[in-house]
């Protein structure tokens, strides 16, 4: 009989530990419509509706950059030695 290994751990990460995961090393590229920009970048105003943009966010969700090019967001992350992952 083959026994399966238990892959669950008895410890869970706290919300604070999860937020710090990847901090300073990982950034997320998140596509968004211009109508949603104010929620993530409240200081940005006057963006025309209907434009597809890309946000670069730190692992903890801190906004780093907003651009109209996914390639520019990734290049900025690489320039700052951040590994990128995509959010949908």
Image (spheres, grey):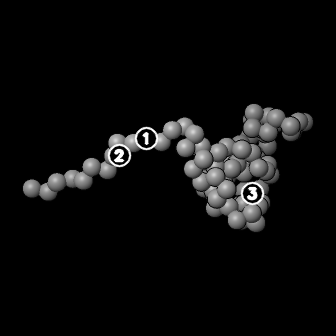
Q: Which residue lies at the image location 35% right of the left edge and 46% below the top edge?
A: 9
Q: Which residue lies at the image location 57% right of the left edge and 50% below the top edge?
A: 21
Mark 3 vs 1, N-terminal side: 1
Q: Is residue 28 in sight in this rendering?
A: no
Pick the front one: 61 or 31: 61
- The reply to whether discs 1 and 2 touch (Cβ–Cβ < 8 Å) is yes
Q: Position of residue 64 (x, y in %)?
A: 76, 50
Alpha-carbon distance for marks 1 and 2?
A: 7 Å
Q: Secondary structure at mark 3?
A: helix
Position of residue 29 in the picture relative to residue 65 (left or right): left
Quadrant location of the N terminus in the rendered image: bottom left
- In this figure, which residue is indicated by the disc labeled 3? 73
Q: Quadrant of residue 44?
A: top right
Label drawn at residue 26: none
Looking at the rendered structure, the number of numbered marks drawn on it comes to: 3
Alpha-carbon distance for marks 3 and 1?
A: 32 Å
Marks 2 and 3: which is nearer the front?
2
Q: Is residue 63 above or below residue 76?
A: above
- In this figure, which residue is indicated by the disc labeled 1? 12
* Mark 3 closeness class: few <14, some 14–19, many ≥20 residues within 10 Å: many
Q: Is residue 32 above or below residue 38?
A: below
- The reply to whether discs 3 and 1 touch (Cβ–Cβ < 8 Å) is no
* Mark 1 closeness class: few <14, some 14–19, many ≥20 residues within 10 Å: few
Q: Secondary structure at mark 1?
A: loop
Label drawn at residue 9: 2
Pick the front one: 71 or 6: 6
Q: Quadrant of residue 84?
A: bottom right
* Mark 2 closeness class: few <14, some 14–19, many ≥20 residues within 10 Å: few
Mark 2 vs 3, N-terminal side: 2
Q: Please identify the residue farthest to the right as the structure is shown.
A: 46
Alpha-carbon distance for marks 2 and 3?
A: 35 Å
Q: Position of residue 8 (x, y in %)?
A: 33, 46
């Amino acid at each position: 009989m083959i026994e399966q290994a238990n892959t669950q751990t008895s410890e869970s990460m706290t919300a604070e530990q999860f937020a710090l995961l990847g901090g300073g090393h990982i950034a997320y590229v998140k596509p968004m419509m211009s109508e949603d920009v104010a929620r993530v970048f409240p200081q940005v105003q006057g963006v025309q509706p209907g434009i597809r943009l890309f946000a670069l966010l730190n692992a903890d969700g801190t906004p780093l950059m907003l651009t109209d090019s996914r390639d520019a967001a990734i290049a900025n992350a690489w320039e700052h030695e951040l590994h990128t992952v995509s959010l949908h």
